Image: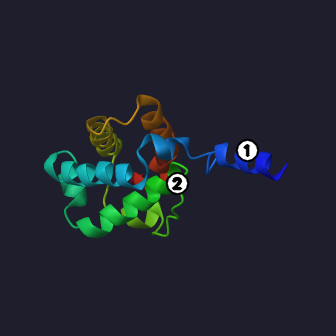
Amino acid sequence: MAIAGTLLMAAAPAHADDAVYRAFGGADGIQRVVNDFVADVHADPRTRPYFAKASDKRLRIMLAKQFCSVTGGPCVYDGSSMKAVHSNLKIDRAAFNAVVEVLQGAMEKHGVPFRAQNQLLAKLAPMYRDIETR
């Protein structure tokens, strides 16, 4: 009986809701996407001004934590609220959408499955309320 229970536990996934996290390739995959995303928002003239004063090191750390947490990974996002971080940046819908496009490009570059991309974006999309300046 104990052997059967052990086999069942071994066959069960570590986290039932971490499929998106795993589709990204775990922490390493998320970090690769985040690294390219940060580089790409600085390279894109539509998004560059909004990231000019950001610490790239901190941005990479906090985005990786946030994406890890949102995708069902073991991380905890302990950063500031989206409203607090973006309140003085005067971000409009066009800028928000440009950042999403850059993120999609980074995910595609790293072979993140389309479904996993959409699942992450669905979790992040409601944040526009706190990111856009009204």
Q: Which residue is drawn at 51% across and 56% down?
A: 69
At 41% across and 55% down in the image, what residue appears?
A: 27
**Residue 70 picture location, percent across and down:** 52, 51
Q: Name the amino acid, label 1.
A: Leu
Disc 2 secondary structure class: loop
Mark 2 to mark 1 CA distance (whole Å): 22 Å
Judged from the image, the secondary structure of the residue bearing numbered disc 1 is: helix
Q: Please report whichever mark, 2 or 1, sits nearer to the chain's N-terminal start.
A: 1
| Any part of residue 4 in sight | yes
Disc 1 crowd, CA 10 A, few/some/many (<14, 14-19, 20+): few
Task: Tell me, yes or no, if residue 12 can be seen here.
Answer: no
Residue 130: image x %, image y %?
A: 47, 55
| Residue 11 picture location, percent across and down | 65, 43
Label 2 crowd (10 A; few <14 / some 14-19 / many >=20): many
Q: Is residue 11 left or right of residue 65?
A: right
The spot of residue 10 in percent (x, y) is: 66, 48
Question: Residue 73: which disc?
Answer: 2
Camera-nearest label, 2 or 1: 1
**In the rendered image, which residue does mark 1 sit on?**
8
Q: Residue placed at 36% from the left, 54% from the top?
A: 28
Q: Looking at the picture, tell me which residue is in the foreground, 33 or 8.
A: 8
Q: Which residue lies furthest to the right in this view?
A: 1
Q: Kindly identify the amino acid type of the residue bearing the numbered disc 2.
A: Gly
Q: In this view, does 61 lie above or below 108?
A: below
Are the residues at dot 2 and dot 1 in contact (C-beta closer than 8 Å)? no
